[in-house]
Amino acid sequence: MKHQTKLIIRHTLAFLFLLMMIAAAEFSGTKEIIFPEMVALVTGYWLSDKPPWRAGPVKLVALMTLCALAGVLLARTEIWLWGKVAIGYVLVAVMLMLYRSTLYPLISACILPVMIDTEDFFYVGVVFTLSVILVTCRALLIRFDILPKEETTWDLPETGLKDVIVWMVTIGVFLVYSAYPLTHGNPYFVAPPLIVGYTAMMRPDCPLLNTPIKPCLMMILCAATGFAARFFLVEQFGLPLVAAAGAALLLYFAFMALLDLRYPPTGAALFLPFLLPAEGLSAYPVLVAVSTVSLTLICFICAGMMRDEWSI
């Protein structure tokens, strides 16, 4: 089977799976079924020949479920929003170090219910179910030679001092950066996809730091596309949410091809508007664009300093 044919099969499967998620949420009236980070996970584990994260199938399902549970529990507390997000971010950072993984979408699984105030444990079941489908389909794609088989271990080496330093800088910068927007009613400025992208790009060895303009552009395009699909197609023209999601996904695939870039957090930014309330949604693409540029610049400076000054 030709590589081009395999890519078509993988993109078709991703398209149908993600539309089924939206359709299930729309027709059941249960918004918690929409998990935007699933677009990122599908991009990394189905559409990319080599996954961008270190996490085997069992670890992925277990950690995604645990982080979703932690997020719901945090959403149920009476702590102010910035405190909840800070606790969730530190918790996920510790889990990633302890379990020697780079599965940064865990951040979204934990922080999303805090951001949208989801206190229903049904969300945990959704994340678990979607994660099981994700790894099962990936195994089948590998089994039928539609996706290349992994040739490396899923686990990172033991966490060393340099890793701890990187995480301490990453956490510290994030806590400072997120304090003002989260205490002044601007949560879109630190939307979960942005946090995931920021965390990945704070790694001194992140290849995206070599071409920072492309991931910036991709994030901005996807956020604007998701907003436009929701605001115009659904709110203005009354089309079903699943139709708007389908149009947005086709553009997402086109962006990846044109820019020759698979940057998973942008997929989550594309689908996040389908989950957010219509009120105040117009601020979403603007705040995401400003924050994307700001965070990319921060990552470029901080990661460069850690690499050059501390030889990390």
Image (spheres, rainbow, N blue to C red):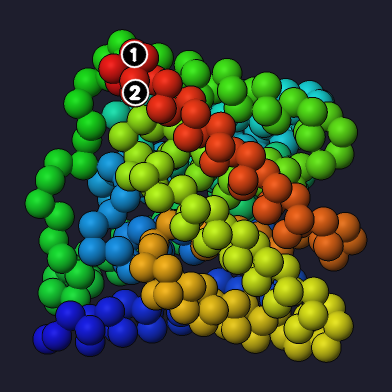
Which three-letter amino acid code belongs to the residue tagged 1?
Trp
The answer to whether residue 142 is above or below residue 206 is: below
> Residue visible at 82% across and 87% down?
238
Q: CA distance from mark 1 to mark 2?
A: 6 Å
Q: Examine the rendering and report whether any part of residue 96 can be seen.
A: no
Q: Secondary structure at mark 1?
A: loop
Q: Secondary structure at mark 2?
A: helix
Task: Indicate the position of residue 65 as horizontal and vertical percent values.
Answer: 47, 44
> Residue visible at 39% across and 75% down?
257
Count of labels in the image: 2
Q: Is residue 136 left or right of residue 246?
A: left
> Residue visible at 23% across and 64% down?
49
What residue did someone put label 2 on?
A: 307
Residue 310's disc number: 1
Which three-letter amino acid code belongs to the residue tagged 2?
Arg
- Classify mark 1: residues with Cα within 10 Å, few (<14), some (14-19) or many (20+): few
Q: The N terminus is located in which quarter?
A: bottom left
Task: Indicate the position of residue 84 as horizontal and vertical percent values.
Answer: 70, 28
Task: Indicate the position of residue 211 as horizontal and vertical percent values.
Answer: 40, 50
The answer to whether residue 278 is above or below residue 302 is: below
Q: The C terminus is located in which quarter?
A: top left
The answer to whether residue 44 is above or below residue 112 is: below
Q: Is residue 39 left or right of residue 246?
A: left
The answer to whether residue 95 is above or below residue 134 is: above
Q: Is residue 215 left or right of residue 236?
A: left
Q: Are marks 1 and 2 in contact (CB under 8 Å)?
A: yes
Q: Examine the rendering and report whether any part of residue 140 can be seen.
A: yes
> Residue visible at 83% across and 29% down?
183
